[in-house]
Each structure stands twice: as structure tokens, then as C-alpha cells.
Amino acid sequence: MLLLVDAMLQSLDVISFNLWQVLISLANLLVLYLILKHFLYKPIRKALEKRQQTLDEEYSKAEGARASAQQYEADWNGRMQTAETEADRIVAASEARAQERDRAMLKDAKQRAGEIIRQAEAEAELEKKKAGQEIRQNIIDLSALLAEQVLPGQLDEEGHEALIDSVIRELDKTGSDGAAGYRGRG
């Protein structure tokens, strides 16, 4: 053990404490610190501050661009909504006009159909009257011919007219039924 203690004491001689060397080392360290601070730290700090300002400006511009893009998107969405509403309104108005046009065309077609039916009925009534008159005329002619053949000398002109008038009265009594019956037989 003694050997070990002796070796330790010899190593302590190597580690001696010299106050002047420590003070000079501290002074060197302080001078080195001040030089590095003046020539390196301040320029690097300024460069970092400039870089930070540049980054802040970039972030600010990006935030402004994002806000502008959001505003543009909101405007665009609003315009799209307005356009969709306007398109819906136009479609609804077009459908309403089309339905009104359809109603008007249907009403016009019904009126025309009614006019055609009335005209056809009027023409049918006119044809019926014409047919009745033709039948009467044919009966008058037939009765006149019959009267001439049956009673050639017995009827004078007044008798002839009286006979025709009586036949016409009989036809008027039967009215249009007789004309329809006559037409149905012929």
C-alpha cells in the first residue's frame, strides 16, 4: 500500500495550483469571449434577426395571401350560390311560362273545338232544314202531279192550291219527325 500512496503523492506534484496561471487563463478567456462576441456573436445575431424579420414578413405575406384566398373563396361560393338561386328562379319562371302557355293553348284549342262543333251543329241544322224543305217541295210536286193525274178536270187552280195548302199543313203538324221519317224510308 505504501507503494500506492507514494504513487499518488508523485502525481499530486504534477497537479499543482498556480494562481497566476489561472488568472491569465481567465483573462485570456475573457478577451477571447469579448473578441468573439464583438466579431462573431453580434454579426451572427444581426443576420439571425434579419432572417427572422424576413421569415416574419414571409409569414405575414402568406397569411395575407391565405386570408385573400379565403375571401376569394367566400366570394366565389357566394356568387355560385347566387348563380344557382338565379338559375333555379329562371327554371321556375320558364316552367311557369310553359305551363301558362300550355293552358292558353289548351283553352284556345277548346274554344276552337267548341266553335267547330257549333259550326258543325249549325251546318247540320241548316242541312236538316234544307232536307225538310226539299222533302216538302218533293211532296208538293208529287201531290201536284198526283192531283193532276187523279183529278184532271175536277180541280181548278183554287182547289189545287187548297189541296197543296192542306198537305203543307199536315207536314207542318208532323214537323221534322215526318221529314226524318220520310228521309228514313227513302
Image (cartoon, rainbow, N blue to C red):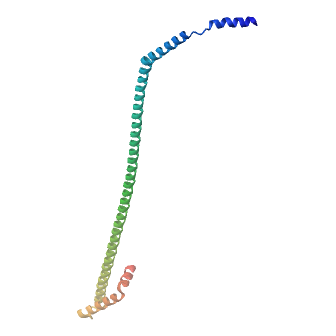
**In this picture, residue 55 sits left or right of residue 25:** left
Answer above or below: position of 38 versus 52. above
| Residue 156 visible in rendering | no
The structure residue drawn at horizontal position 29% and vertical position 83%, both measured from the top left corner, is 137
Residues 103 and 23: in front is 23
The structure residue drawn at horizontal position 41% and vertical position 23%, both measured from the top left corner, is 46
- Indicate the quadrant where residue 112 lies: bottom left
Picture coordinates of residue 89, whole percent (x, y): 38, 55
Answer above or below: position of 1 versus 51. above
- Indicate the quadrant where residue 48 lies: top left
**In this picture, residue 58 sits left or right of residue 27:** left
- Indicate the quadrant where residue 121 lies: bottom left
> What is the residue that sits farthest to the left in this orientation?
157
The structure residue drawn at horizontal position 32% and vertical position 73%, both measured from the top left corner, is 119
Picture coordinates of residue 165, whole percent (x, y): 28, 90
| Residue 6 visible in rendering | yes
* Number of numbered markers: 0
Picture coordinates of residue 164, whole percent (x, y): 28, 89
Residues 53 and 43: in front is 43
Picture coordinates of residue 99, whole percent (x, y): 38, 61
Residues 175 and 154: in front is 175
> What is the residue that sits farthest to the front in this orientation?
19
The structure residue drawn at horizontal position 40% and vertical position 49%, both measured from the top left corner, is 81
For the N terminus, the image quarter is top right
For the C terminus, the image quarter is bottom left
